[in-house]
Image: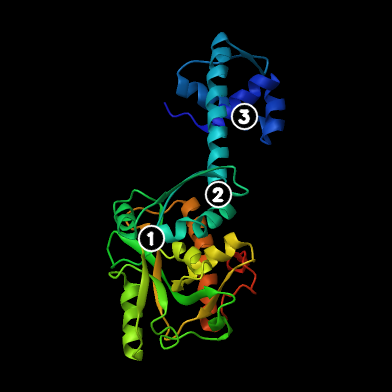
């Protein structure tokens, strides 16, 4: 049996209107076309649905029973069409996102909040793990999107990478805050908060200090940069941190920062990446979210060309909506 949507819809209209001519008018077809459609339906079913009397169709009992079935099928198809339309419009579905600790506190939740604000039927799972774990989750196709420090290339992962400039974080009333640029010589033997010694930013920083003949005094060893900000506010140290940490601080401080950020030279960067599974195509929802996430990260990359993210700048500028 090979029934079509058009056959069912035509049958329902004939039953509702009680007339082939009225059904044809409602469907925008000719009467012969409607009659032919009903005849084809009956042949598919193997029995007649209507008695023909003087050009009129008189429903048999089987037609009334079949109408209930047709209504159920058409209603389900209509609902499915609405759901798929919502999915196509990014208004329904689910996202599984994995992010590292540095982005989980403020940056990524703000991007997610913007994305789902006008999409009440979109559900989001946000899981925070180390960059190494996120890499494995994406490689095994468990999550739709990952945001982590850039891993080595893998065939199971598609990556979009970003080099985020690092800045020196210090109290606004510190004498060094008046300087346009901070260097290793300026921070010679001054207390620093830095990531653990195996991390790429620490190794890069140590190389810069050694090359400048300056002493790197790591007073606080951290897993992420965010805890350093409270230590800086207390006047205990300085920190060379990435642009996402800068953006996160400007977000939660509301523009009333005790901390300011100055460019650090030589240029020091942290490479971050948006990761997606390579062995399955992304959903439309995941594609839409990645577009917004890319825009938010690219806004952080721009200051590296010269402008610095200080407290005088709009703390929400890094989340400017794409044109």
Mark 2 Cα shell of 10 Å, populated few (<14), some (14-19), many (≥20): many
Label 3 sits on residue: 34
- Which residue is located at x 65 percent, y 70 percent? 314
Q: Is residue 295 visible?
A: no
Left/right placement of residue 274 relative to residue 234 reads left
State which tag comes first along the sequence, 2 or 3.
3
Closer to viewer: mark 3 or mark 1: 1
Disc 2, SS: loop
Which of the two residues, 91 or 26, is positioned nearer the viewer here? 91
* Image location (x, y in percent) of residue 89: 57, 49
Mark 2 in CB contact with mark 3 (< 8 angstroms): no
Mark 2 in CB contact with mark 1 (< 8 angstroms): no
Label 2 sits on residue: 90
Give the CA distance from mark 2 to mark 1.
Answer: 20 Å
Q: Quadrant of residue 296?
A: bottom right
Q: Quadrant of residue 166?
A: bottom left
Mark 3 Cα shell of 10 Å, populated few (<14), some (14-19), many (≥20): many
- Which residue is located at x 46 percent, y 76 percent? 165
Closer to viewer: mark 2 or mark 1: 1
Relative to 298, say whether 293 is above or below. above
Q: Quadrant of the C terminus?
A: bottom right
Disc 1, SS: strand
Residue 275 shows which numbered tag? 1
* Image location (x, y in percent) of residue 35: 61, 26
Which of the two residues, 272 or 268, is positioned nearer the viewer here? 268
Relative to 310, say whether 95 is above or below. above
């Amino acid at each position: 049996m090979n029934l079509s949507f058009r056959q069912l819809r035509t049958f329902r209209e004939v039953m509702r209107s009680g007339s082939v001519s009225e059904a044809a008018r409602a469907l925008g077809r000719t009467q012969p076309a409607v009659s032919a459609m009903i005849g084809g339906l009956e042949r598919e079913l193997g029995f007649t649905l209507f008695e023909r009397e003087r050009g009129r169709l008189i429903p048999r009992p089987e037609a009334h029973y079949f109408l209930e079935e047709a209504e159920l099928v058409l209603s389900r198809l209509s609902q499915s069409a609405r759901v798929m339309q919502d999915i196509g419009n990014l208004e329904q579905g689910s996202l599984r996102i994995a992010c590292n600790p540095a982005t989980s506190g403020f940056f990524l939740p703000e991007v997610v909040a913007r994305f789902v604000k006008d999409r009440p039927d979109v559900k989001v799972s946000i899981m925070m793990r180390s960059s190494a774990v996120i890499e494995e989750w994406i490689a095994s196709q468990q999550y739709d999107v990952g945001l982590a420090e850039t891993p080595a290339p893998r065939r199971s992962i598609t990556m979009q990478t970003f080099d985020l400039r690092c800045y020196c974080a210090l109290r606004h009333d510190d004498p060094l805050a008046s300087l346009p640029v901070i260097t290793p010589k300026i921070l010679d033997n001054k207390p620093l908060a830095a990531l653990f010694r195996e991390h790429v930013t620490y190794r890069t920083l140590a190389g810069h200090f050694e090359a400048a003949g300056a002493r790197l005094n790591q007073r606080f060893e951290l897993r992420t940069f965010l805890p350093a900000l409270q230590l800086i506010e207390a006047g205990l140290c300085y920190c060379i941190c990435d642009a996402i940490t800068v953006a996160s601080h400007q977000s939660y401080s509301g523009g009333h920062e005790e901390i300011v950020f100055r460019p650090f030279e030589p240029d020091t960067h942290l490479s971050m990446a948006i990761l997606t599974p390579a062995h399955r195509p992304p959903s439309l929802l995941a594609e839409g979210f990645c577009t917004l996430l890319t825009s938010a990260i690219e806004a952080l990359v721009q200051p590296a060309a010269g402008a610095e993210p200080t407290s005088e700048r709009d703390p929400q500028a890094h989340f400017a909506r794409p044109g």
